[in-house]
Amino acid sequence: MAMKIDLHIHSKDCSDGKMTIPEIFEEAHRRRITVISISDHDSIDCQETAQALASEYDIKYITGVELNISFSHQRYRNSKPVSLDMLGYQYDIHNKALIKKLKEVREYRRKRAEQILEKINEELTKEHLKPFTHQDLEAIEETGDGAFGRPHIANYMVKKGIVSNKQKAFDKYLVKCNVPKMPVSLEEASKLIRGAGGKLVHAHPSDPNGTSLVSLTPSIHEQHKIIKESMLPWLDGIECWHTRHNPETISAHLAFAKKEGLLVTGGSDCHQQPGIMGTLDIPAYVAEQFGL
């Protein structure tokens, strides 16, 4: 039987997906997916449950997590940092340093959201509009399912009728009222994941709509130069197959990874809204790299 692989799935329990961990496994079983990884944002709290369910459903499982990092390059954007996503795989879920850091990141995220709302409240007060309350913060946090940030605040502002759409929330309030994210560097992310016995993979490096190297340059050739010059010592692999990577992008990343001796991975990045898990044609050798 052909192997069906998806190494980039988000859950509702520990991230911003729409399905719980049990629902994900039920769906993966129904779709005959043979290898999966749940890679929630800055959280590994669901990994033990995932491992137990994988065993129950006879699905091969690789521990996963998606870490947001801050990265800058002297040739682009005047060295101003951009956000990138990294995937950690096959790490020890009981590693103390990793657990401690992820707890700090989540606590900082909540503090950051509070600070952003305080700044927005200053603007709303100037406009004689009703400021946000602690109940509003809790309601926003609920929509984020443990990974909330500015997009969730924007959605809430639309829902409350403060702005007509998400873009207006950013243009009028969220750019002006921003508070920096906790700056986790590539080196730190790599040290954490490798220190826990895992492998660090650059998530969706060429995603045109997401947190990717496209924010520095749309050229894949240039993206590869950036990876080679500034990232290679800390990376173990590249996510080549992704819902928003076209065939040319996938081929280019595969060739680059082969040349540089990097692992190659792939996944739908599915939040089940409407992305569906197991829809990408990912070859069996991807799982074999992890000893499966």
Image (spheres, rainbow, N blue to C red):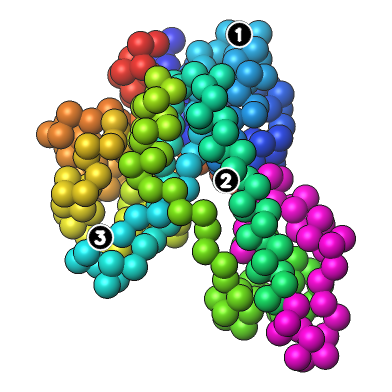
Res 283 label: none
Identified by mark 2, the residue type is Val
As displayed, is residue 168 above or below residue 1? below
As displayed, is residue 184 above or below residue 45? below
Q: Badge 2: how crowded within 10 Å, few (<14), some, or many (20+)?
A: some
Classify mark 1: helix, strand or loop.
Answer: helix
- Quadrant containing the C terminus is top left
Kindly check if marks 1 and 3 are in contact, taking CB atoms under 8 A apart as contact.
Answer: no
Identified by mark 1, the residue type is Ser
**Dot in front, 1 or 2:** 2
In this rendering, position of residue 247 left or right of residue 209: left
Residue visible at 29% across and 36% down?
Answer: 235
Pointer 2 residue: 105
Quadrant in which residue 162 is drawn: bottom right
- Quadrant containing the N terminus is top left
Give percent across and percent down for residue 104.
59, 43
Res 55 label: 1
Identified by mark 3, the residue type is His
Q: What stretch is highlighted in magenta?
A: 121-150
Pointer 3 residue: 73
